Amino acid sequence: MAQVKNKQIVLKNYVNGFPKESDMLIVTSDTINLNLPEGSNAVLVKNLYLSCDPYIRGRMSKTKGSYIDSFTPGSPIEGLGVAKVLESGHSNFKKGDLVWGGTRWEEYSVLNAPETLFKIEQTDVPLSYYTGILGMPGMTAYAGFYEVCSPKKGEYVFVSAASGAVGQLVGQFAKLLGCYVVGSAGTKEKVDLLKNKFGYDEAFNYKEEQDLDAALKRYFPDGIDIYFENVGGKMLDAVLPNMRLNSRISVCGMISQYNQEQGDGVRNLFHIITKSVLMKGFIVTHFYHMYPKYMEMVMPLIKQGKICYIEDIAEGLESAPTALVGLFSGRNVGKQVVVVARE
Ligand code: NAP
């Protein structure tokens, strides 16, 4: 049996507060058989692209800080990625197939639940897109905007973390529908991208605003119909009094809260009653049955150049800890991808 060294990124210890590069270790001692045992139902894959996603932080806490179980220190980080099948014991897959879905931060993985993987059928787009626009973040933007918000042409839409993996798509979907769209982001470079690349009508740097309520009133003098919530905390509190009658808040994420022991208080909840605001959280996996419908919508938009997608590419598995940590200081510009191998 062919045995090779398998470089891995392993969680060193449970994390408190902001994650650091030193919370993860690069390990090269482990070896892996490049053949599956007889009768195995698993698939053996070579990992190509890994996805850095904010939810991974929750799995680094000892107490279940996420809706998915915590990682085990000493084990490789688990996450989503794009991979090539080297050998398959599962009837859905064969050698040479490209897949996206749950894998681990290592060069080669034996995946024991291959039914959760999606086979990649269309390869005339960058493969890394299956970590972003054609993968989980794309489905998140689609479900969180169209399914949760029931948007209508002409509505006033606000998106926070607006240049990220999810936000950049929400803004573009809203513009394609004919909405007025404003985004917030944490640097001038990102604000420029929002306005000049993604077509947002307006954008502002939330870090430079002394008064978020005043900033929102500047861009939404008549209020907000749809808030796509990615950050939580102070931003949510500022948004609530600016919501219009019968408006909707799609609660996608609250990244400003993920590294805090105790979450920020939100004082303006009363506006949910007076404005009849519908505020709804969601988890993207509950919408995965809609993936084929989403692909039918988004593929032509990509190919006709009606939608664009910005990625932040980190080269090499060794770069994964820095790339992940960077999500929480806004170092990434667009979808954070790690290249392990290019086929
Ligand atoms: P991302 O935007 O690509 O990266 C995270 C961004 O969040 C950073 O670049 C940074 O941008 C911003 N950020 C970090 N700390 C912040 C803080 N304290 N306050 C304000 N902004 C902060 O990430 P993503 O993958 O698109 O995810 C966006 C949100 O969606 C996250 O909350 C994530 O957990 C959530 N999500 C939810 C689901 C679901 O199923 N519900 C699925 C996927 C993602 P700035 O430079 O703009 O600050």
Image (cartoon, grey):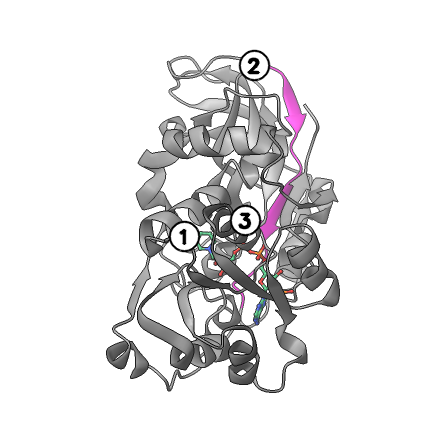
Q: What residue sits right under mark 1 in the picture? A: 153
Report crowding for label 2: few under 14, some 14 to 19, many 20 or more residues within 10 A (C-alpha).
Answer: few
Mark 1 / mark 3, whichever is N-terminal: 1
Residue 68 x %, y %: 38, 53
Q: Quadrant of ligand 1?
A: bottom right
Relative height, residue 8 to residue 216 (above, below): above
Residue drawn at the location 47% of the way across and 35% of the way down: 101
The stretch of residues the image draws in magenta is 1-15
- CA separation, marks 2 and 1? 44 Å
Mark linked to residue 18: none
- Secondary element under disc 1, as helix, strand or loop, is loop
Q: Is 143 on the left-hand or right-hand side of 21?
A: left
Q: Is 267 on the left-hand or right-hand side of 274?
A: right
- CA separation, marks 1 and 3? 13 Å
Judging depth in this view, the residue of 60 and 259 nearest the camera is 259
Specify the amino acid type for callout 2.
Gly
Residue drawn at the location 72% of the way across and 60% of the way down: 192
Q: What residue sits right under mark 2 in the picture? A: 96
Judging depth in this view, the residue of 280 and 302 nearest the camera is 302
- Secondary element under disc 3, as helix, strand or loop, is helix
Report crowding for label 3: few under 14, some 14 to 19, many 20 or more residues within 10 A (C-alpha).
Answer: many
Q: What residue sits right under mark 3 in the picture? A: 172
